[in-house]
Image (cartoon, grey):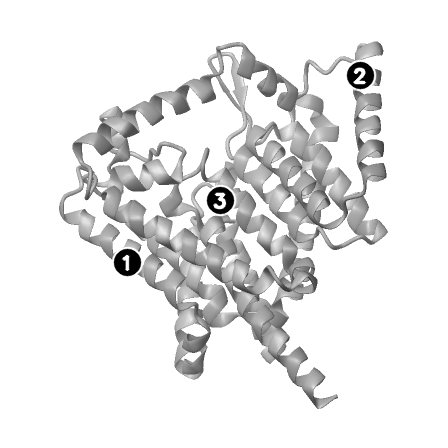
Amino acid sequence: MNEVYRHIKILFYLILLFSGMLKWGPLQAFDSTIIFGVLCILIMGMELIMQPNQLSKIWRWPSLFVFLILVLSVLSLSYTSSYAYCYKKILQFVLTVAAFYYPQSVLKSEDHPLLVNYIRVFLLIAVATLLFFYISFGYTFLPLIILATDGTTSIPNYLVLSAFLVIALLYLINKNSIFDIILKLLAVFLLFQLGGRGPIIILVAILFLDYMLLNFRMKRLLVFIAGLILVLSIVFYLDLDLSNNRSLNRFQRLNSGNDKSLNERIRLINASFNIIEDNTWLGTGIGSYGQEAKGIDFKAYPHNLFLEVASEIGFTGLLLTILFLISVIWATLKYFYTRKHLFVKYKGAVYVAFFLFLENLKSNSFFENKLLFGSIGILLLLSQASNTEEKLLNVDHEKK
């Protein structure tokens, strides 16, 4: 029974984190975020009642800063210019905060391998599904969620799908069985088909960083460069038709000056500076960005966590957010910097949190990013576990 409950705790939590993938097609009416968010909050409440000592495992400063950001966001309801959407956003932020506290108050470090195994299963399902549509329909890819608008083709939630593939790849970074290698190669192929530029660039940067930190050899680097040159040469000399590749097309548009996504982000950045200048310390209130930037009370954000926080809850909220991030970095470095063997063991979780932070600098809403807050919560759980493991190793050494 306890083993079943352990699986339920992890499964419900992962569904909450990846619930954005379930909001398309026939599942639009099924709000899995709220359903599984409430279930996770109930589980967290029961755990804290039955095991109140779990509170001592929660990192003090990161948790305090998150709580203060939540309090400030709730207080901003009293002056927000949003008259309806603000309540949806504060509800989502409550669930996001729950995603942050959940790993520290419910899970244990021993649950991490099981969590990774579930992510492997999710990745297998995602890869099989996406491959089926790709093989069946070619480059049009995922016809159930393709939306044709004004002669252009876009893929709703393609960033969420891309982010999931990258997260799964990073969590499985230490898994090198033949099955895992094939699964990861298929995931990389599908990632390039989806066309999420940010996730692709950040993944390459993290893998290169990992290589430089842990496996650097000049010979290997030269082999990598030679292989890359060979592949590009083959593509160039054989004149392969890559015009239907969504990722290449989206990268090419960056130089065309006609990239709607990039132009819209630049416009939102400029609007953010205007909002911040007029409402410096307290912002315009939670959920107000759409009203302030576009004159419509709906879901909108500047695609940058610092600008979103400063716009909606002011420099006060921005200061708390920066302190939160600094406290997380300090907690992580404190236990991993001098313990390379533990960093290697949990580096997938470190890279996932780093990836989601960088992704949140150019996409997504900070207040609704359960993946970012959840990954930080898992990272803090493992940092605490690293401290415990190190103490046990020291005790064993002293006994010997």
Q: Any mark on residue 235, and which?
A: 2
Which residue in the structure is indicated by mark 3? 357
Q: Earlier in the sequence, mark 3 or mark 2?
A: 2
Q: Tell me the quarter of the picture where residue 68 sits.
A: bottom left
The one nearer the camera, 347 or 209, is 209
Q: Label 1's element?
A: helix
- Kindly identify the amino acid type of the residue bearing the numbered disc 2: Val
- Kindly identify the amino acid type of the residue bearing the numbered disc 3: Phe
Quadrant including the N terminus = bottom right
196 with respect to 278 (left or right): right
**Local crowd size for mark 2, using a 10 Å CA cut-off: few (<14), some (14–19), many (≥20):** few
From the viewer's perspective, is residue 264 above or below residue 188? above
**Local crowd size for mark 1, using a 10 Å CA cut-off: few (<14), some (14–19), many (≥20):** some
How far separated are the C-alphas under marks 1 and 3?
20 Å
Q: Position of residue 138 (x, y in %)?
A: 71, 24
Residue situated furthest left in the rendering: 79
Q: Position of residue 275 (x, y in %)?
A: 23, 30
Q: Residue at x 49, y 16 (%)?
A: 259
Q: Residue at x 59, y 59 (%)?
A: 337
**Local crowd size for mark 3, using a 10 Å CA cut-off: few (<14), some (14–19), many (≥20):** many
Tag in front: 3 or 2: 3
Which residue in the structure is indicated by mark 1? 68
Q: Label 3's element?
A: helix
How far separated are the C-alphas under marks 3 and 2?
34 Å
- Kindly identify the amino acid type of the residue bearing the numbered disc 1: Leu
233 with respect to 380 (left or right): right
Q: Label 2's element?
A: helix
Label 2–label 1 contact, CB within 8 A: no
Residue 22: tell me if it is visible.
no
